[in-house]
Image: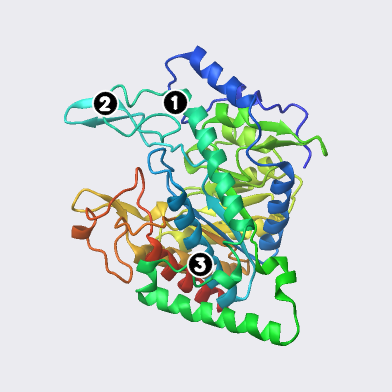
Amino acid sequence: MTTPATWTPSSWRDLPAMQQPDWPDPGALDHAVKTIAALPPLVFAGEARSLTASLAEVAGGRAFLLQAGDCAESFDAFSADSIRDKLKVILQMAVVLQYSAGVPVVKVGRIAGQFAKPRSAPTERVDGVELPSFRGHMVNDIAFTSAARQADPDRLITAYHQSAATLNLLRAFTKGGFADLSRVHAWNQEFVASSAEGRSYEFVADEIDRALRFMAACGIDTQAVPQLHTVDFYTSHEALILGYEEALTRQDSLTGDWYACSAHMLWIGERTRQLDGAHVHFLSGVSNPVGCKIGPTATADEVLALCEALNPQRVPGRLTLITRMGADKIESQLPPLLRAVKEAGHPVVWACDPMHGNTFTSPSGRKTRHFDAVLAEIAGFFRAHEVAQTWPGGVHIELTGEDVTECLGGADEILDTDLDTRYETMCDPRLNARQSLDLAFQVAALLRR
């Protein structure tokens, strides 16, 4: 990718930047950004190029994207166990999809950097008290006090170090034996193994064991096949806080291209995809694969303009369009976009975010989503692609490895009265491990058709 001649890592500052925190101390912000700029990159240009190549296979209809992880990572709930359990669920889902549907699965986590969240309003009011909205642990704290809600630039540095530690553990898990296919049974968490989804997964794991034994019986040295013992796992997050992203943008010594080295893949949210805005401009100049959320109000002209801005050279795998329409709108709003992009020849990855368009407040006052609506939007996504004769390239899911009760429905039939049992998210409700595995089987069935 060739970066526009007028682009620099800081040129976004000349444009309107939505959803940026109101930092009270510019000097402290400048110090934090300069500190991060002097630290090593979190990911490397070669890794980002490898992800682009894998996503090119998705764009060509030869692979499937699974992008999944936390709504918003927490400084407080940070542990090796939580990282491992989240990775377990994603690996389980990938195994189900890959074995059942017969296509390679590109695994991208919403992890090691997903610390900032856009908000619908800059402030919130509780019992007559108005304070700044919680914008994720990279910016402020969720506690409803004046001190906690003040934007603190030192949190940017904390986010960097937590991301580095998370990436270190993810690399150890995915390359050090934890992701070995011979361990597929070990990934089945106890509370998942006791469920119907877990039993279905065990059947797949047994079949994989049989396949590995068959290969060995045929004289194939399975130990000499690295693809059976390690996986490529990539990180992603919404590129929201542009000062942080700028500080971690580095020029590749091999190609001279600029890469945002905070994650392998970055995306622009529905609230920050203005064509004349800072976020689109910033991501237009980095060579990472990038994504853009597309909501139900997007027009074909707007989507085509975003394609031109973010991938003018039409590099396969460079751009992922992540639709978030809602179950009741997906089949009416998506087809015109599919046709327009296909006719214009843009080699995009189409992924479905079935979470954000199906969020509502339950009678108990909890923000939630119903599992049936999530599945309905994915099914509508597949039907729209079937009509347009385009490839339904992936899903983008908010989930956790914990046994939470945040989304209604699923095999356990979580009810509104159950939400308070383990409602632990800092922002949006997530699928738990059982719901996530069930979703993987449902998507695999759609892919087989």
Q: Report the residue at 70% width, 87% height from top.
A: 217
Separation of residues labelled 3 and 2 (CA atoms): 40 Å
Which residue position is annotated with label 1? Answer: 21
Residue type beneath disc 3:
Gln
Q: Is residue 396 above or below residue 120?
A: below
Residue 225 at x, y percent in the picture: 73, 70
Which comes sooner in the sequence, label 3 or label 2? Answer: 3
Q: Is residue 250 above or below residue 194?
A: above
Residue 349 visible in image: no
Which comes sooner in the sequence, label 3 or label 1? Answer: 1
Which residue position is annotated with label 3? Answer: 92
Of 241 and 180, the residue lying toward us:
180
Q: Quadrant of the N terminus?
A: top right
Of 18 and 29, the residue lying toward us:
29
Give the structural element (helix, strand or loop) at label 3: helix
Left or right of 32 in this view: 318: right
